[in-house]
Amino acid sequence: MSKLEEVVQRFSATPILFVGSGMSRRYLNLPDWKGLLERLAKIVNDDEFTYSSYESRAKSLELKAGLMPKVAELIQIDFDEKWFTNPSIRTVEKPVLEKIKRNGLSPFKAEIAALIQKETEINQEYLEEIKKLAQISEKSIAGVITTNYDSFLEDTLNGFTTYVGQTQLIFSSIHGIAEIYKIHGSVENPESIIINEKDYFMFEEKSAYLAAKLMTIFMEYPIIFMGYSIGDTNIQKIIKSIVDCLDEEQVAILADRFIFIEYKENMNGVEISPFTMMIDQKPLIMKKIVLSDFMMLYNALSKKKTKLPVKILRRFKEELYNYTVTNVPTANLRVAALDDTRVDDEELVLAIGKVSDLGLKGLKGIDGNEWYRDIVLDDLEFTADEMLEYAFPKVSRQNSARLPIHKYLKRVTKEFPECQELANKLNFDLIISPSLKKQRKSGWEYTSVAQIWSHEKGSLERATRLLALLEEEQYDINELESVLKEIFSEDVNALQNASSPERTNIRRLILIYDYLKWGK
């Protein structure tokens, strides 16, 4: 095992990559920050000393966010003025022109985005490295934080979700895995690009919120900084915003988690050594890895894998989060009834896998409410054959053999005599009880589903009871379907949460619906 592999194997988890412009220069041949500003300055004035003049002016002014943001601010003022008066320098597409015209987007930022998109081209020299990076992203990279504007990372990493800018990151429910955080903006959204002094000033104002959002990630995952100079002021400020929130003991923990990759041209092998960065008198110790061939790093990372692809882990983390917030399970998250006091915590299991692998066993756990709801919503991802073979015996016993079943019998590919026998008993006259039939005969004013629902739906119990008093020929199947779907749209667990009379009434309507739509 190489020394680099030993470092990776000591990681407590798969790492987060913190990616800078060096990666864009390597893989896309894009300019660095200074090179980008030089290109824009030359558009303002095609002279070899134009950029130098801006830099000279910037140095004579107060620098609130550093030299480069001030240079960008000066260039932007002149660039925007020229852009508005000289159509020949405009290269952006019509949708972006509309944003400049109507939303106040700076032409400077719009043209930066256009330039990067136009010149983005994979460097064939490093094609194998890029393929390897894409491959290891499936199980060996937990996520990415980047200050780059280009779309290389989201185009390369498989199934990662991208968040652009501080605002989107702060106000989104991030899950810390299989995600890309583009904290300085993106070419896909030119307004989000952070480049001038005002942008950086506002970024630093919000840095505490960003640090709070990223804190858990920094404390739980190894962080690999790559594509940055070790003295990069941007990266130091971001690290400072994190470190400022930690005590000395917590800062010491980061020593084993921070890895700084330094590129050295034409170097053979790898050098690994400790490196100390001073953050406001707090020493932050990290490992520095010097190399030329990034394939060595990617091969080492490939030895550290999650058992499941990270995009799958993120999917289920998101599903669990959404269920926690909404209490509404989805097609990808099945939650059985857990209100039985006889069920101990030790008996509960979270299973992740394909429905075809786990679902047939899960079918035996379906209850009557889920069965009835599926008749209307079709939200259980099982075939009719599977429903009748695996779920029917138990659900039928629990519901006194009174179940809507015509829908499934219409879709089966096999014979189910017991189910067919039940279906034969569930015609319209047998669904409606004698007591309801008597109520129907006394002074009845309504003649349609829509009429009853529009007048009576303020009381769910009364509306659903009155709907069962219609004659068979008075039912419009589309109106009845609309009513049932409206009930479930307001509460997908309507049957579980309804009162006993409401549940009885809704189930009766689903029996009628099932018979009229599939049984006649």
Image (cartoon, helix red, strand yellow):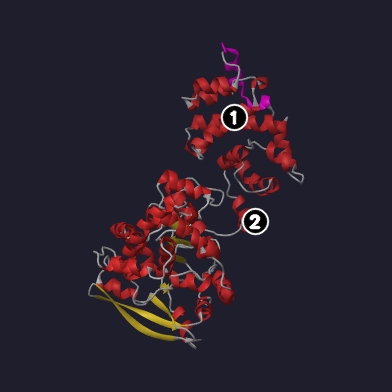
The amino acid sitting under disc 2 is: Ser
- The reply, left or right, for residue 341 in relation to residue 242 is right
Q: Which residue is more in the foreground, 288 or 51?
A: 51
Q: Nearer the viewer, mark 2 or mark 1?
A: 2
Q: Residues within 10 Å of mark 2 (few under 14, many from 20)?
A: few
**Residue at the farthest bottom position:** 268
Name the element at disc 1.
helix
Q: Residue furthest top?
A: 443
Q: Camera-side residue: 506 or 378?
A: 378
In magenta, the rendered stretch is 428-444
Kindly state the secondary structure of the residue where label 2 is placed.
helix
Q: Which residue matches tag 1?
A: 509
Question: Which disc number belongs to residue 356?
Answer: 2
The residue shown at (44%, 45%) is 101
Q: Residue at x 56, y 67 (%)?
A: 121
Q: Main secondary structure of the magenta part?
A: helix
Q: Which x, y percent locates residue 82?
A: 41, 54
* Residue 173 visible (yes or no): no
Q: Residue 468: name its quadrant.
A: top right
Residue at screen point 57% across, 32% down: 484
Q: Is residue 403 above or below residue 270?
A: above
Closest to the observer, 496 or 103: 103
Residue 202 is marked as none
Figure check: 445 above or below 154: above
The residue under label 1 is which amino acid type? Leu
Report whether 362 appears left or right of 409.
left
